[in-house]
Amino acid sequence: MHFVCESGMSHCVLGTDRENPGNPPPCEACIRQSRHLFADGNVHWFKYSLDADLAADLKELNVQDLSNFECSRIKAPLVTPGRAVPLGSFVLPSIRWALRRHTLNDDEETRQLLRSYILSSYNIAQNFSAFLDEYKPSSVIIFNGTMFPEATARWVVKARGIRVITHEVGFQRFSAFFTDEEATAYPIHIPENFELTEVQNRRLDNYLQDRFKGQFTMAGISFWPEIRQLGDTILEKITHFRQVIPVFTNVVYDTSQVHANTVFPHMFAWLNLVLEIIRANPDTLFVIRAHPDEMRPGTRKISRESVAGWIEQNQVTNLPNVIFIDSQDYISSYEVIKLSKFIMVYNSSIGMEAVLMGIPVLCGGKARYTQYPIVFFPQSIEEYREKAEEFISTSRIELPLEYLKNARQFLYFQLFRTSLSFGKYLEDGGRKGFVHLKPFSWEALLTENSPTLKVLVEGITGKDANHRIIPGYKIENTSSQFLVEDSLS
């Protein structure tokens, strides 16, 4: 049963015009696409209804109050009756993503968009509660659970004690990750006795060989149209310093930041500390690298609170021991890493890749790979400062062999074990990030003919989920993930 929007929000995330947030979303085109996609499905459409009392409660609140707003108006039966619904926390990642910034201005335009999102979130909570009452599902499957429509639905489902499964795009082409936990955090559980085989190690090495050349995509997007080697200017400058420490940043509004901000309140707070460390160590060259997605040309994802802006605001490039590589400067990050003593990252995946290259990593934010001992991850700001100074001053940093082993196992699981492949059914579409269905017979969707569909059906329904082995595949179902590996791929 599909729960589908029919102008069910006054403003939605994808329909927000960040240049003019007050503009209404393009509902007509969106509904037309939904009617096409779900033409033969069982659909429950929901519409928007303004709650005037709630709107009045929100009218005089500032951005901070709106971000922390909780609502006790939800009348649906919950596991804990009368439990306040944290609508403000639901919409905060969404407005940051829509406006392409972490720091929100306390102006009327931002407040109005927050109010619209909160009112829309409330409407979804009411409608989805009624939907659950009518259809009484055994489980609910939603997209990653971070944007406010899905975050709201997930909260309502969990509050009733119903199982909810979230999913995200996988790291391999045409793959997806499903979990009972938060998909954007990528919870991965590796058995204690797991060891990579020779075939698996070779498969991982082949992937890394392409990765280090920039030959990879994510959700159909290629981040590296080209990769350039270090120029003579940079190489000459390096010779004037005792050591090189690269600093790798992230996109500050990305959904991963919801999980990353545990030690530092946000990435720029981490960068401010890094800047203090840079100024205190003039004999060390710091190479600050902006994430390639920060200013991705030809898209609507250009950041409005960027590392480049932070660099300019703090006059960082005036420091003689800093090189800044902007997001559209496609110098190879891996060439920089090879020359480094250690690297600093916030929560970028390049942290795990650096460990695989034998380079120690000092991590500032919680990353998907910090689930296991892979990088050095201090648990307070002061501990981070102390560890950075220790690494800078010591002559040699020992990288525990355990970190390298864990990094290889984690990356292998992330790529080949925890993501389900839909490559049998999908091909690239005419637009970036879109896919088309390949021609295939209906029999290809039967569980006996598709390991992917078998894992999904068994994992979602809970039937026959007892670690069964399928020829050519190893399937492991746990309470929190579904794993499939094509040993012949």
Image (cartoon, helix red, strand yellow):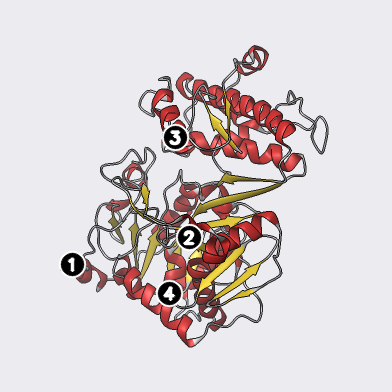
- Relative height, residue 356 to residue 287 (above, below): below
Quarter that holds the N terminus = top right
Q: Which residue is mark 3?
A: 98
Where residue 364 sits: x, y (%)? 52, 58
Gap in angstroms between the C-alphas marked 3 and 1: 37 Å
Gap in angstroms between the C-alphas marked 2 and 4: 18 Å
Determine contact: label 3, label 2, CB under 8 Å: no
Front one among 332 and 141: 141
Which residue lies at the image location 70% right of the left edge and 37% below the top edge? 156
Find the residue positioned furthest to the left. Answer: 232
Q: Residues within 10 Å of mark 3 (few under 14, many from 20)?
A: many
| Mark toward the start of the polypeptide (1 vs 2) | 1
Where residue 256 sits: x, y (%)? 51, 51
**Amino acid type, mark 2:** Ala
| Mark toward the start of the polypeptide (2 vs 4) | 2
**Amino acid type, mark 4:** Ser
Q: Give the label, 4 or 3, closer to the camera.
A: 4
Gap in angstroms between the C-alphas marked 4 and 3: 38 Å
Q: Give the label, 3 or 2, closer to the camera.
A: 2
Q: Which residue is mark 1?
A: 231
Q: Which residue is mark 2?
A: 444
Q: Is residue 242 left or right of residue 365?
A: left
Gap in angstroms between the C-alphas marked 1 and 2: 51 Å
**Amino acid type, mark 1:** Gly
Which residue lies at the image location 40% right of the left edge and 64% below the top edge? 281
Which residue lies at the image location 62% right of the left edge and 60% below the top edge? 379
